[in-house]
Amino acid sequence: MTTCLITGLTRILVLTYILGASLGQSFPDPSSYPATELSTNIGEAEPRDGGADLEFRYHDHDQLTRYLRAISAKYPALTALYSIGKSVQGRDLWVMVVSASPYEHMIGKPDVKYVANIHGNEAVGRELLLHLIQHLVTSYDTDSYIKWLLDNTRIHLMPSMNPDGFSISKEGQCDTIHGRHNARRYDLNRNFPDYFKANTKQPQPETEAVKEWISKIQFVVSGSLHGGALVASYPFDNTPSASPLNAVFQSYAHTPSIAPDDDVFRHLSLVYSRNHAKMARGVSCKSGSPRFENGITNGAAWYPLTGGMQDYNYLWHGCMEITLEISCCKYPPAHELPKYWQDNKESLIKFLAEAHRGAHGFVMDENGNPVERAAVRVRGRDVAYHTTKYGEFWRILLPGNYRLEVSADGYLPQEVEFIVVDRHPTLLNVTLHSAKGYVAGRTTTRKPSRVVPINLDRAAPTVQTTASATSTTSGQIHFPQD
Ligand SMILES: *[C@@H]1O[C@H](CO)[C@@H](O)[C@H](O)[C@H]1NC(C)=O
Ligand SMILES: [Zn+2]
């Protein structure tokens, strides 16, 4: 009774936020962004059709919407349904959160995401995310690993970023591009701002919604689910030398475009491919199509592209996104879906858990208040991550010795040495001291967090001390076995 009341109240508050947003106000802070959809009646009884059951078949937009609503009604303590906006044709871009804290960000614990069906005719990921939702909510009480994951992670799942494209796609079409684009014929995975090349494509509503979404919530890892190949592809997708003039040759150049976190991206991709039933074997989909060693590839080494979503996630928002090509056939017959679910189930779960690897912590001022948008860099990796409004940061890293460089306007830069071990995340709290009374500090890079040349960054005076930083390997979060 009490629980119901509280849930009801939360929903009312959340609805108020959404109404505010639809009236043109800016979105609320990340912790309160996720919300139930407007049309859910408060206190509505469970749907008559018992729609929380899930069959292995394709779900059109209405069926998908009904399923998500039924799940959120049946599992109110583990799920929250929200829409980040609408497609060109007015379909909601649904996101379901699955977590022990679905409505609120857990301070110090990572948010993670999957986005499927950005290409409307690549349909397997869309269904797999529905099955992932089902699996997570039904396993929470019986599977200690899933319980650990949901207790310590907020998982945001978007089954379709391109519902309009899906609506004209045809089951059984393996290789066509019919349905790939949005309703205005834009390829949404070429529609993001690009670090390497100016992207002149007109931003589409679906892309704008995703950009706003990932600016509100600090996602630590992300997977974008595609079809048409069997490989985990990691940044960078684009390269400084890719130009429309030599695009034809570039397609066959096989030149990798190496990200500062190449080792981590390769690792994340291997986690997916090795937990997959067959991806790591690297067998080509058909004769003439490429083989990928261990089932992974650098994006640009496969073929460079401008305006992709994964480079944007990484460079603008410090979210480590990779692209998961999970079926040779883009839209296989429904009877094959159980096989795809079995092949990908373990990968889908283990990949998200990687958000708990490496170092994370808080940046605070001398009074213990969080410092928001402090720039956090790991030496030798010239990409800046930024702290959240709670001062949090996450940096996925493989075991080793590292040096963290933290800077923020009005504070003296701080450097901290730390180690990362395999099984437990390193907790790193960093205190910044006010720059008042010192020579004016450097200015920090503001959004977007571009890759900065090493030398520019070293020019500023730095204070090297670990005296006001605490570093511990946390015994609380048990990192799962691979
Ligand atoms: C780090 O900071 C957070 C947030 O202020 C605090 O909850 C936590 O106890 C601190 N941990 C250590 C080891 O200092
Ligand atoms: Zn695709």
Image (tube, rainbow, N blue to C red):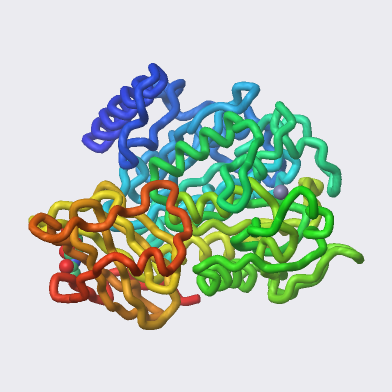
User: Is residue 216 positioned above or below 224 on the image?
Assistant: above
* x and y, in percent, of residue 366 in the image: 10, 59
| Numbered circles on residues, count | 0
Q: Is residue 166 visible?
A: no
Quadrant containing the N terminus is top left
Of 123 and 402, the residue lying toward us: 402
Q: Quick check: 376 left or right of 327?
A: left
In the image, is 150 to the left or to the right of 89? Answer: left
- Vertical position of residue 159 compared to residue 457: above or below: above
For residue 9, what is the image quadrant?
top left
The image shows residue 215, relative to residue 286, as above or below, that is above
Please identify the residue farthest to the top as the structure is shown. Answer: 23
Q: Position of residue 148 (x, y in %)?
A: 37, 63
Q: Between 463 and 6, which is closer to the camera in this rendering? A: 463
Left or right: 197, with 290 as reference point = left
Query: Foreground: 190 or 159?
Result: 190
Q: What residue is drawn where x is 19% and y is 56%? A: 440
Residue 458 in the figure: left or right of residue 338: left
Residue 234 visible in the shown view = yes
- Where's residue 118, x and y in %? 65, 42
Using the rendered view, name the quadrant where residue 430 is placed: bottom left
